[in-house]
Image (cartoon, rainbow, N blue to C red):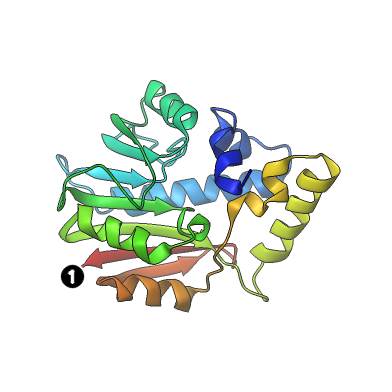
Amino acid sequence: MNGKEFYEKRQKDFYHRLTQSSNPVRAWFHRFRQHAVYELVTENYTRGDIIVDAGCGNCLWNEDKLPVVGVDVAQNLVEHAFKEGRLSSTVICDIKQIGLPSEYADIAVAAEIIEHISDPDKALDEIKRIVKKNGKLVVTVPYDTVFSAWRPLFWLHCSLQGWVFGDEYYQQRCGHVNHYSPRKIRELLEKHDFSIIRQFTNFRFTIFTLAQKT
């Protein structure tokens, strides 16, 4: 099995469990990340806008239960989010082949997904296709460099969960295959005709980027 196959078998409330972790650093990390995405989306949302969350998982950022189209391969996570009211509709598919019309979304979210995809260029081409001209894109990726705060803690966590507690998902590094710095994710987005509006990090754990399709 690869990381994607293990991900599809995660518990239906997998991401909610992370925010409730008994480890206070881990719980803070996941709560901060979800709320920061929420703020980036709601700052740019106008009533009637179409939001697509590509790689939505449990869509925990959707605190206000806005109408969001959720795209993910993990049906159990998506169905749980739909039942909880955080998704208004769902598409079970790979984000490299999203079954939605072109120029469809006013806002797209790609939170903690680009680092998992073996062909990020193809994924960004597909996200670009479904976003309207001048539409917004919210992207988050781990700050995965030698001197980041995230990398050593992630290595430690994967070692503990994977090799001490035997969780094969963590043995696969949770399916992470790409490593990003702020510059590298900016360059990837600009390569696919997204202009950077804003970028920030939370103590070098996560890179948050707001971009616009040109």
Is 124 left or right of 75, judged from the image as shown?
A: left
Tell me: 107 left or right of 31: left
Residue at 39%, 53% (x, y): give it: 110
Disc 1: CA contacts within 10 A as few (<14), some (14-19) or many (>=20): some
Tell whether 117 sits left or right of 192.
right
Determine the residue located farthest toward the right in the rendered image: 164
Q: Quarter-wise, where is residue 151 in the image?
A: bottom right
Residue furthest top in the image:
83
Number of marks in picture: 1
Query: Foreground residue, 184 or 120?
Result: 120
Report x, y in % for residue 128. Answer: 25, 60
User: Where, quadrant-wise, is the C terminus in this rendering?
Assistant: bottom left
> Residue at point 16% right, 51% down?
102
**What residue do we see at 42% from left, 38% from top?**
59
Q: Position of residue 105 (x, y in %)?
A: 20, 49
Where is residue 166 shown, x and y percent of the image?
80, 40
Check the image and report above or below for 39 versus 14. Answer: below
Horizontal side of 168 relative to 64 (left or right) equals right
Q: Residue at the front extreme?
A: 1
Residue type of the residue flagged with mark 1: Thr
Q: Which of the image's four quarters has the N terminus?
A: top right
Residue drawn at x 36%, y 25% as measured from the top left: 85
Q: Position of residue 56 (x, y in %)?
A: 41, 42
**Up-down relation of residue 163 to residue 153 (above or below):** above
- Looking at the picture, does residue 196 appear above or below residue 63? below
Q: Is mark 1 on a helix, strand or loop?
A: loop
The residue wearing badge 1 is: 214
